[in-house]
Image (spheres, rainbow, N blue to C red):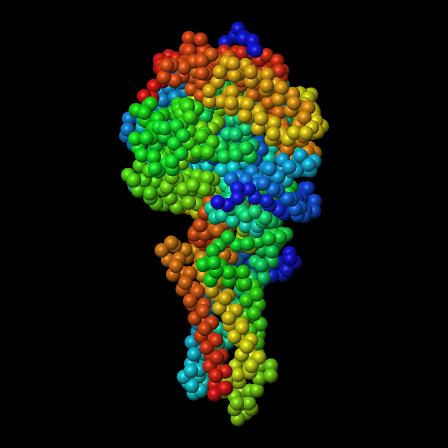
Amino acid sequence: MFRVASDTLNSRVPAGPLEQKWDKHRFNLKLVNPANKRKYSVIVVGTGLAGGSAAASLGELGYSVKAFCFQDSPRRAHSIAAQGGINAAKNYPNDGDSIWRLFYDTIKGGDYRAREANVYRLAQVANNIIDQCVAQGVPFAREYGGTLANRSFGGAQLSRTFYCRGQTGQQLLLGAYQALMRQVSTGRVKMFARREMLELIVSNGAARGIVVRNLENGKLEVHTADAVVLCTGGYGNVYYLSTNAKGCNVTASWRCHRRGAYFANPCYTQIHPTCIPVSGDYQSKLTLMSESLRNDGRVWVPKNKGDHRAPGQIPDEERDYYLERRYPSFGNLAPRDISSRAAKERTDAGYGVGESGLAVFLDFRDAIARDGEDVVRKKYGNLFHMYEKITAENPYKVPMRIYPAVHYTMGGLWVDYNLMSNLPGLYVLGEANFSDHGANRLGASALMQGLSDGYFVIPYTIGDYLAGAKHGKLAEDAPECRAALQDAEARITKLLSVNGRRTVDSFHRELGLLMWDYCGMARTKSGLEATIPRIRALREEFWTNVRVPGESGTLNQSLEKAGRVADFMEFAELLAVDALHRNESCGGHFREEYQTEDGEAARDDENYSYVAAWEFQGAGNEPVLHREPLVFENVKPSTRSYK
Amino acid sequence: MSSDTLNLTLRVWRQAGPDKPGGFCDYQLDGVSTHMSFLEMLDVLNEKLIAAGDEPVAFDHDCREGICGMCSLMINGQAHGPDRGTTTCQLHMRRFASGETITIEPWRATPFPVVRDLVVNRSAFDRIIQSGGFVSVNTGNAPDGNSVPVPGNRQEVAMDAAACIGCGACVAACKNASAMLFVSAKVSQLSILPQGQPERSARVLGMVAQMDKEGFGSCTNTSECEAACPAEVSVSHIARLNREYMKALVFADR
Amino acid sequence: MNALLRILGLPACFLAMIPGMAPVVRALSSSVGQKLLMAASGLSLVGFLVVHLAGNLQLYAGEDVFNAYAAKLHSLGPILGIAEVGLFGMFALHIGLAVSTAAMNRTARGSAYAMKQTKQGLFVLPAGGASNWMMVTGILIFIFLVSHILDMKLKKGFGVDYSAALDASGEATNSFQAVKAVLQHPAHSVLYIVCIIALGIHLSHGIRSALQTFGLHHRNWNFIFRWSGFLLAWAIAGGFISVVVWAMAAKNS
């Protein structure tokens, strides 16, 4: 299935006490003279929280930046859909928070599969992020006196989450977008919207450029630079149905992987517990209801199987508030992976509600009785509104029905402490990298990581690389550029020429279902072993039977989708291989063979306390596993308990 | 209980490219589930078209949960369809009746040229933001978040304006194709917050100038934009923009 | 369309040549600036209408009172002349801006929708509906204006018999009788009523819209802004119509 390399990956984590690593490292990084910065060019792919903030910050420093996104405007990146909030250990509520506690919670939440030094740095710069965003005019919720408000979130026992109603991601992204637009107006950043990255250009072993397709007119373009920063998000859409935007894809990451970048921990996928259940086979995506709802909503199913009474008629003693029962200290605020699995456990056992039986109740009856409908409306009005729009049910009157859905992917391209991949000059930021969340991400941490990488890490670490890079300018018609361009062209031609009978979406749907059933919330050895050949067979059918109408010289959304699904087909196999190789359960990766007596994830620290970084060997060929051992100098891995 | 499926006639604007002529095509689509979203209904139409050897209808969409602002569509002459405070992706087919003919057009405005079918180019909005819709604060320059208090109720008003998703429905619905609601939302948000004060005058003058340059129409205060806005941004922000503009005219230093 | 806009922009170009005026002209020729001028000229014309109506209502006090008022007005001499020039200036500005913004708006839309519906409820129609008729009602008001000047100022109303208003020298100086003569002419009375209704519609949107353009918008006061504009509009229109009705009734009795 795979080969193991004998080397160990060097994470380049600096030595010294945890608290001083980042400061000392920043001192040791080489600097680029302010007057010389404009001579260096940087390509930033993706304009979400990580990409937008990186492009803006690098522009502010004076680098010549080119930024790319596949949407019609950088403001549409899917970071915009994050609802709940962003963590920072400001300790404004005076409830005992500290950088150390945020670090500890994140490491523990990630089930001890993240790098200590990265996570500590994340906790350190989180405070700066809040300050920066406030200064940009992000309208964070405030108390009446004018100070910043906080709320609590899953996986934490204190209030450290800053928020803008249910639209925190939107407001943070618009802050970064506006900073980016300011740089565009100064000319330091050139913005290329509606461009999809199709190839990475590698020259002398270093990442030097990209090939993009202009989605409006189909023209392929070559862009070269001194470094490439990839901020292209996660791969949740490999499951077809997820809370990701329709356009989210793995293509940019996968193209880099094919050119030599290692892909780390692809099996760490996060299933979010509070999404609106699937209603039919035409369904195109799933909608997340913010986790913040679990602050006041209580999760339950009937105690009796097949209890089809209206929820309001089921008395309390016949309700099973299973999260409160199993996890008395965290209750409804248990971390995402645990809540999701608990829901799956109940529905698998036949206690699910709704027509499909694949749902549980999230009930606000008690909160409304306690605080009144107005208070609940003020906190969650937009979410209730959204729920009612989609389901035509009024959640003030009847409990919401929710079910877990694929939401976030902790895996991604492998990066070192400087966020550089194993390919020199290729940096990977945000959800696209693997770095900070280990095997499970806590709520309100994705926004924190994206912005930390973009605003406060890459501006320092990229200078170190550029100052040392002595390569000259790479011409856009250099042989390696032409080769990459031809590869991209050939793929497009091939996709258009298959002219089979099935649509791209039908393949994507089938792949997604396969992944969800065998590589989703719970995985088994036998299931995964059976799935891998099926993925290969589906991939083969795709390349012989897909129908991509239209031509390449115009806006062609079928062609865009086809390219993305083709890459998902290759990537899905790696995800399954990674899940099969990791003989333990940790965070979002749950292997049914490895669980404790009461159904909790059983980690194997002795054999699997490492990052699995995969090297590409050609589609269908056995990938090579490189390992980066995880060293815990400051927190001792223990069994995660939220009881 | 009403029937769960609909039979519909769709009148869809088809246009092969920016400089190509466009026109309506009629499609019959039967068995549409009332639980589908409007865009899922179009997905079904496209699957059918591809199977029949035709080219699918191009339309913009991404998050499909009403926040990215990518989806558009004039549905029976209404931006984002008949519901208020709703984007097309959140509109569900239960809102329509079987046998109905649904006319689907792209946003129409000279600054939003059609790219293909129902897809338009909204980069004019980006250029308006570039002309002042930001606070000039470099990364690393920020004081502590609590150093400047913002009264809770002021912040709420700023958030009301900041909720704009930049979809362009205001332009599409306005009889003059005016972008005043979009521009005013950003001007208003940043003029309320203390962080926006230093550039207050330059911002409103710059953004209005760019709005005019892009070729949007002028505001006739009909409030149609407010009714069409999926984020329910109020025309009170247009009034604030007007105040800001007058103030900047009279008092701006330069 | 562009040529039209260029011609309409000529006065602004000339104005900008006056030293020190260029920045002001530039600021006021933006879309928002034009709306501000539109609102300012519109509201000053409303002010004129209020004064005019106050004068007209003196018809009810009888022939002597009204004629004395008219005589006093005429005795103002040059001041009246200046006021009239200002008034015509306001009309010209208002109409010029209306045509220029209408042209701009038409260009901004480009090709029209095959289907277009409002998303506003019927309750806003007092103002929202009227806004769709500003150009049509504006044209009617302009026609009325021309006819009204011919009728009342130049005493050359088409088909009107001014004999009752003549003085010894054969000039129609008896304003009271002249008004009655015009308003008792059936075609004129119909035209006047139709056009004054158009005026009511025009103002019912115009006044509120002008307040919004000047930034008067507040949750606590919007109700008052909206309805005071609406009521003032129809009070003015109603006042003028009452005069026409009064004159017609006087003829029949």
Q: At 46% from the left edge and 44% from the top edge, which residue is drawn? A: B231
Task: Locate residue B207, reporting x and y percent.
Answer: 51, 47
> Toward which corner of the image does residue C218 lie, by quadrant?
bottom left
In this rendering, the answer to whether B173 lies above or below A315 is: below
> Toward which corner of the image does residue C171 lie, by quadrant?
bottom right
Q: At 44% from the left edge and 87% from the top edge, which residue is drawn? A: C63
> Toward which corner of the image does residue A503 lie, by quadrant?
top right
In-front residue for pair A301/A252: A301
Residue A418 shows up from this direction: no
Q: At 44% from the left edge and 39% from the top edge, which residue is drawn? A: A387
Task: Locate residue A557, reporting x and y percent.
Answer: 63, 34
Residue A405 horizontal side relative to residue A250, left or right: left
Q: How many marks can you see?
A: 0
Residue A533 shows up from this direction: yes
Q: At 55% from the left edge and 89% from the top edge, which residue is drawn? A: C163
Task: Locate residue C85, reporting x and y percent.
Answer: 52, 72
In this rendering, the answer to whether A103 lies above or below B180 is: above
